[in-house]
Image: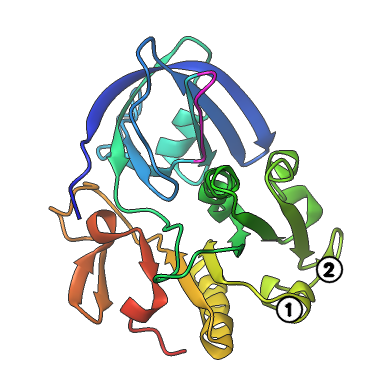
Amino acid sequence: MEEQKKYVLDLSVAGVERLHERYVLLHLTQKEQLPPMMPGQFVEVRVDRSPGTFLRRPISINFVDRQRNELWLLVAMVGEGTRQLACLKEGDVLNVVGPLGHGFTCQSGATALHDVLLVGGGVGVAPLLYQGAFLKSLGVKPTFLLGARTSKDLLMLDEFRKYGEVYITTEDGSEGEKGFVTQHTILQKQRFDLIQTCGPTPMMRAVARYAYQQGIDCEVSLENMMACGLGACLCCVEKTTEGNLCVCKEGPVFNIKRLLWQL
């Protein structure tokens, strides 16, 4: 596969949306046209004004709005670095490197896709919005299955509904069906050509197990700890059928057939 060109970009903050007490959505832009970016890829973000943050932070590409020339990043505030990113204001400049990694595919083997299920949990829903929009632009039908602890933890539902049907599970039953995503009745009612998922590892393993048992092709977006984003530091290594691979360079999206998961 041909290596995609990477860019170092100083992007201007066009807007900041606080979606939740723990999540903010950054709208980033520049005067020049943003470079090509594919769903499932990520960027490495430099955190300024944070003396304790030495490394860039990897953040999934949430969406690319070509009309507004905006890159959207959904930031979960989990540490000093991401809390500092959440303090950005309109007009601030954010330095990013990207796009990095290999994202989701849009075909299953030699078979054209018709029905794709996109399963997300927590901040893992982030890359699925751009993938859903991309699939729809190709005439492929995306269905979203989004899980959260409570209704308050569900993110960007109106955006997801622009591109496909949205089904929901919450652990407390406050919205959608009560339980986990793998317990949703849509999985018994509808057959899918491909499942693509991102979120907590236990959730992705459960989704992968379901897909394997049903004979459905499945891709997972791994969230191993990444530092360099270029495959140099080896801190994000995952054991695969091809040996140890750097998730940041060979992934973050992998077909489950390549992973040594017990399904």
Q: Earlier in the sequence, mark 2 or mark 1?
A: 2
Position of residue 80 measured from the top left corner of the image (x, y, whole percent): 43, 38
**In this rendering, position of residue 100 left or right of residue 86:** left
Position of residue 218 measured from the top left corner of the image (x, y, whole percent): 48, 73
Q: Nearer the viewer, residue 247 or 137?
A: 137
The correct choice, above or below, for 101 with respect to 24 in the image is below
The amino acid type, in three-letter code, at marker 2 is: Glu
Residue at 21% x, 46% y is 228
Residue at 24% x, 27% y is 8
Q: What label does residue 183 carry, if any?
A: 1
Q: Circle 2 — which element?
A: strand
The correct choice, above or below, for 70 with respect to 210 in the image is above
For mark 2, what is the residue? Answer: 177
Outermost residue toward the right? 174
State which region is magenta.
62-68
Q: Circle 1 — which element?
A: helix
